[in-house]
Image: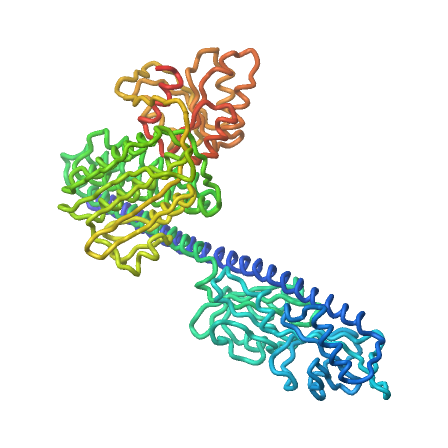
Amino acid sequence: MQTKRRKTTYILPVAIVIILVVVLAFGVFYMSKSLMKLTIEERSGQLEEMVTQIQANLDCSLHTHWNMVEGLNNASQGKHYESIQDLCDNIALLENVFCTDMYGSRVMFLDDQGTGYLKEGSVGIWHDVSHLTDGDIRHTFVSETDNIDGSFLVFSHELDTPVTVGEENVRFTNVVLLKDIHTVKQYYTTKTYGGKAATYIIKKNGTLAYFDAENDDVIGARNIYKALKEVEYVQEQTFDEVKEQLDRNGIASANIRMNGNEYYYCLTSLDDYDMTLMLLISADCVAINTMNMMNSTVRTLTIFMSIIVLLMLLAFFSLIKVQRSKQLVKLEQETNKELNQLRLVAESANEAKSTFLNNMSHDIRTPMNAIIGFTNIAMKHNPSHEIKSCLNKISDSSEHLLALINDVLDISRIESGKIKYVPSAVNIAEVTDSVLTIMYGYLANRNINFNTEFDEPPASYVLTDAVRIREVLVNILGNAVKFTNDGGSITFTVKYNSGEDDSHINVQYRIADTGIGMDEGYIEHIFDEFSQEERGARTQYKGTGLGMAITKRYVDLMGGTILVESKKGVGSIFTIDLPMETTDACEINKKSVSTANIDLNGLNILLAEDNDLNAEIAIVQLEELGIRITRASDGDEVVKIFEENPQGTFDMILMDVMMPNKNGYEATKAIRSIHNRPDAVTIPIIAMTANAFAEDVQSSLEAGMDGHLSKPIVIDEVIKTIARNLNR
């Protein structure tokens, strides 16, 4: 019986681990597939938008040329010329009046026998005259006639009244504008894809009328529709479905594979001209940033889930040791508690994964708050050496993952234009000092010679963005420390140069190191997103490869420049120039507050938090400070608790934002509007939320809150914020 119980004890954790591994693996697979589907839809949509614009440009151009043909008709109809030479001279005059050379076009008249006449004279029977025999007055088609050198887009209009020539009154029935097909390229060429898109003009029956691209025709068929039917389609699509969509909507796109390569094509109807425009582009050139971000997201989640599984296995082996030793009952309990915490973390990660694309910042920061919070709590309970090792790995991995998430969020927010440059008055010397403080932490336990050469600033205060400057300098200096071996050196130089006028200066930051350096070929790509010079760098040095991309975007945002010089095995030099405006702002004394001198014992705080994990983290850490906590689980409940308790019951409210029934903004406005309660207006309300961007802080203040704390919470920042708002 005891052996059976022991087997059951061991088999159950093993089964749980196996099930979780399978569930996590399936989750990664399902999310990858979903992201790929969304990426294909985004790529197709982007291509359709581009082709719609091209169609509009082309339609506008064709309409302009039809206006010119109408003008030629009005200027020529019913006229009589004494000779063919007079007619040719008039053609030359018309070309001059209508400036056809500017449009790459020529004028031709057709007699009733189909003979064409240019300003140079007769070109003989025009081979494309058969296009004009269907009884219509106007015709547009692509011509490759042997009568005239070149390929043309033809605009033909039957004269309202024929032109006659000579005593025989030879009748000329049509005026024709021949536009060199190569001049049409300006209307459908797009720089969005670096000129790599191939353009096809297709006749109504599917045959190729014209092709234009820098490279050879990858389709290589006379009938484009027939060729598109035979290629392989991604996402179980067929050409018949694409053609049906084209006939219905006038535009359609698809993802295909040809000759082992993946392409996107988009068809749009030129209904007034019985032709179809097609744009063909390699998949490698469409929505590159989205594809890179998707791959980085999948890799990050895979790494994170692998760490969870690994830690669960380590905890499981610890459990086995506990079961074998009767004397380690306490350790067994702590291990079971750790297993339960890891299970909650895994559930939170699964929850975040399901809504990752819709609310990336909030839903990822929430589980990160649980991981970091519970890890810190567990570390305070004197765990054993093995459990402490596991907790340290969780802490290190969490901090690394949070850095990766912040990088991905920052680059996406920069690209979407949500991060704005809002300069404010700052002491430029203090900005540099704060960077040095961070750097000395990086240099701890490193044998690197760190030199500084700082000029005296011509003005103490300037208008700039101190946070962005600090991020730029810390990122570059951090890389210098990371890639410089012990025994090397780093030199940080700050110079102040004259600006565009007396009220402006140009601050130059120069960071030189004797690190591993870079190849010349890689320097051109150092500011690309997800860029690292060697594949091994990701394993050895870690990171998303977004740091330098974000640095470049911030420098550009502030109107500055950044230059890189590097040589493999010798070192690198980064030079940043930032223009700044001087100001007479009064000096702001910023005093550092030590949390050790803050006494919060006996405070009563009302905590609004719908997430049990986040609530538990906050309650445990705040109660350790002697604070009494009353929790509300949603927006309605926090308003109700405040109303039902007498005035002065609570010293402060910590308010989550994303809650059911009422969100944090609505709950704050409801409390502030309570009548006959003076403390409803004066009680400090602090947002404590995973919504961490500048616009979220502004929304909190506009809703009537007094401050903002971002998750994952840092207990020192919580203490300082509480003390500041209570004047402690």
Q: Quadrant of residue 651?
A: top left
Q: Is residue 723 above or below residue 574?
A: above
Residue 513, horizontal then vertical, whole percent: 22, 47
Q: Is residue 1 visible?
A: no
Residue at left offset 63%, top offset 71%: 104
Residue 411 relative to residue 144: left or right: left
388 or 559: which is nearer to us?
Answer: 559
Question: Does 298 appear above or below 149?
Answer: above
Number of dots carrying numbers: 0
Q: State which quarter of the image contains the N terminus.
A: top left
Image coords of residue 415 (percent x, y): 46, 47
Nearest the eye: 309 or 262 = 262
Asked whether 528 or 282 is in front, the reply is 528
Q: Could you say which is closer to the camera, residue 162 or residue 713?
A: 162
Compared across the picture, whether 510 is left or right of 272 comes to: left
Question: Which residue is painted at 29% across and 44% down in the image?
Answer: 476
Q: Is residue 578 above or below residue 673?
A: below
Can you give x and y, in whole percent of width and height, for residue 666 in the image? 54, 27
Instruction: Give the quadrant of residue 495.
Output: top left
Is residue 192 shown left or right of residue 8? right
Pick the quarter of the image with the C terminus. Answer: top left
Residue in the picture at 66% in, 86% down: 147
Q: Can the viewer see residue 303?
A: yes
Q: Position of residue 166 (x, y in %)?
A: 83, 86
Above or below, comparing residue 548 to residue 72 in the picture: above
